[in-house]
Amino acid sequence: MGLTGKPLLILAIVLAVVLFTLTVWCWPRLARRSVPAVLGRVGMLLATQLAVFATVGLLANNSFLFYGSWADLFGREQELGVVTDHAAGTLAAKNIVRVGSQRPDVPGGSLPRVGGRIDKVVIAGERSGIESTAYVYLPPEYFQPAFARRTFPAVVVLTGYPGTSENLIKGLRYPRTAHERVKAGRAQPMILVMLRPTVAPPRDTECVDVEGGPRTETFFAQDVPRAVAAGYRVGERARNWGIIGNSTGGYCALKIGLHHPDRYAASAGLSAYYEAAEDPTTGDLFHGDEAARRRADLLWSLDNRPQPGSSFLVTSSRHGEANYADTRRFVAKVRRPAQVSSIVLDSGGHNFNTWRREIPAALEWLSSRLSES
């Protein structure tokens, strides 16, 4: 029974209700001052509270997808092995291997030409030396004869920290939303490359090339587009690529878009912050290199480095988001040839519900700024 499935949640709710009812029913019989009666009361109260806590925890996890599976919850390794002797239907590209696939949660999802397909892949970064799992959403058009010779624009989609890639599929519903936007005529078909920025868990590298450590910026700026373009029908020019993320992923998306306009034409940060975090989860990212630290400050970069010829989208809320003031500063500092757009909600927190309200418009924005070839 899956951790995020409805059956487990329903079972927990039923169990909590049954235990509460039994506690109320049996309480008069357990009101005596004998040792068995006292133990009975303690046991009934403890069982009921545990059932209620489990129900609340499952509700929260289903809403925010802190953990995508039992193995994720208990910290067990769950990555599949990488097949090197490729069978029919696997990707033969040098730095990307498909290790599984699943159908999207859309009408007709069982047929790729109707609902598309989600591939689970392993990307091996040739330049960074980083290896990471990702999910690649292929739209229905990718499998239709009329589009057989077409290349598609691609968008790298990043979670926050620590995050799981599954959050982007189940919690933030990127494939479903992309499918709906295309059906509504609001966006063009795009390939989504979904992964988390935590490529060296549990460390939060803030998408920095750490001296003597993970070269995370190189992985996302160079390795991911090259590997995906080698394995799928995706263009290799900047105008074919966008990048989006929430929270830490939003910071990474804006940073990579700002510093690598030759790779990404458009970048979107949902509830992003604008300066690399430095705390126990990151460790020493810059090793005293003040130039690298300043470069990781996006507001400083906009003031002191040449403006790129690319587009940026930032989001915030007037009430409930801590990044509102910095988001306004970011918008004010963008100058030509760069372009900037924003989504500002009246109210919204730093959570999945807020980001689900922003993702449809953000995907439409990305679609309008990317081309297929």
Image (cartoon, rainbow, N blue to C red):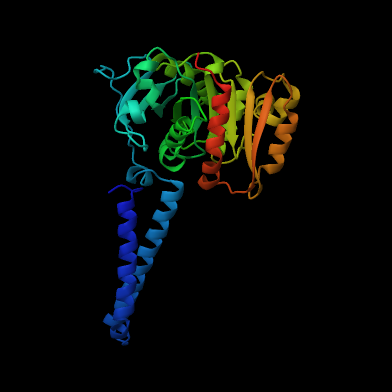
> Residue 150 at what x, y percent from top left?
43, 14
Front in this rendered view, residue 320 or 163: 320
Q: Position of residue 229 (x, y in %)?
A: 44, 16
Q: Quadrant of residue 327?
A: top right
Q: Is residue 73 in sight in this rendering?
A: yes
Q: Is residue 97 found left or right of 205 in the rendered image?
A: left
Q: Residue at x 38, y 67 (%)?
A: 49
In the rendered image of this protein, does residue 51 appear above or below residue 215? below
Above or below residue 272? Residue 32 is below
State how many labels appear. 0
Residue 182 image offset from top left, x and y in percent: 47, 30
* Nearest to the observer: residue 266 or residue 58: 266
Say whether residue 122 is left or right of residue 207.
Answer: left
Residue at 35 percent across and 63 percent down: it is: 51
**Residue at 67% across, 28% down:** 340
In the image, residue 127 above or below residue 113? above
Residue 21 x/y as whole percent: 32, 74
Q: Is residue 210 visible?
A: no
| Figure check: 339 above or below 17 | above
